[in-house]
Amino acid sequence: MELILIRHGEKQKIAQFNPINKRNDPPLTKRGKQQAQLTGKFLKSESINKIYSSDMLRTIQTSEQISQEIRLPVTPQPELREIYFGDLETGGWENFTTISPEIFRIYCRRNTDFNYPNGESGYEVFQRLSPLIKQLIQNNDSKVALVAHGGVIRVILCGLLNIPFGHRFNMGFPVYNCSITRIQHNSTLQSFQLHQFNVISHIPTDLRTG
């Protein structure tokens, strides 16, 4: 089974809190929709069996554009939501040093897993993702697309490749919008191998964002 991990398109830089998922949940920009459409066209010739998407607005809008191109329905999965940043969701990243100076110092080291202020850690994110990934392995589809978030893609790679979650910050700075990462499950070895990471060759230079 091949997992195709796709980051959402460029999002609007606005505060739009969603009380249902308790996260800042802005829509795509016009450019973000173009990125998603180009990604769908790029993947159109591949025999993808299913599309799963985080149920946040920017990922749903991205997966819908891809769906229109490859003619497959989208299955929303709350497990694929972005990392819950806790107090930063409403307090704002620009206030991180005020909200929690100690956690901000750990964040700046970029080598240790930690909980955001009243939020999730990388390990906790992988725990909520694990049942979905196990189910995908059992389903044994040959190729599955997961439309998710930069933080979640990093966590998936760490969890499946046995990389410490604190090292995720060294993976793609940034993970580009609508980038494609491919990871293959080897049923004989019962393990995953990374084949491609953060590929954006399908996005023209003037449309690339991260």
Image (tube, grey):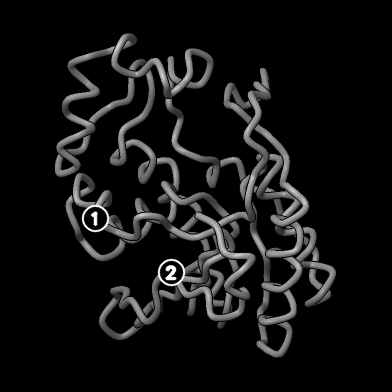
Q: Position of residue 105 (x, y in %)?
A: 17, 25
- In screen coordinates, is 65 left or right of 164? right
**What residue does disc 1 label?**
170
Q: Position of residue 39 (x, y in %)?
A: 67, 72
Lower sequence index among marks 2 and 1: 1
73 shown above or below 54:
below
Residue shown at the point (17%, 16%) measured from the top left: 102
How crowded pointer 1 is (Cα within 10 Å; few <14, some 14-19, many 20+) is rated as few
Residue shown at the point (44%, 36%) measured from the top left: 83
> Residue type at mark 2?
Asn
- In screen coordinates, is 64 left or right of 120? right
Q: Position of residue 152 (x, y in %)?
A: 44, 49
Q: How many numbered marks, from 0 up? A: 2
> Residue type at mark 1?
Asn
- In screen coordinates, is 181 left or right of 62? left
How crowded pointer 2 is (Cα within 10 Å; few <14, some 14-19, many 20+) is rated as many
Q: Which mark is residue 198?
A: 2
Q: Position of residue 93 (x, y in %)?
A: 43, 24
- Tags 2 and 1 touching, CB below 8 Å: no
In the foreground, 130 or 196: 196
Q: Quadrant of residue 144?
A: bottom right
Residue shown at the point (73%, 40%) measured from the top left: 27
Q: At numbered mark 2, what does the secondary structure look like: helix, strand or loop? A: strand
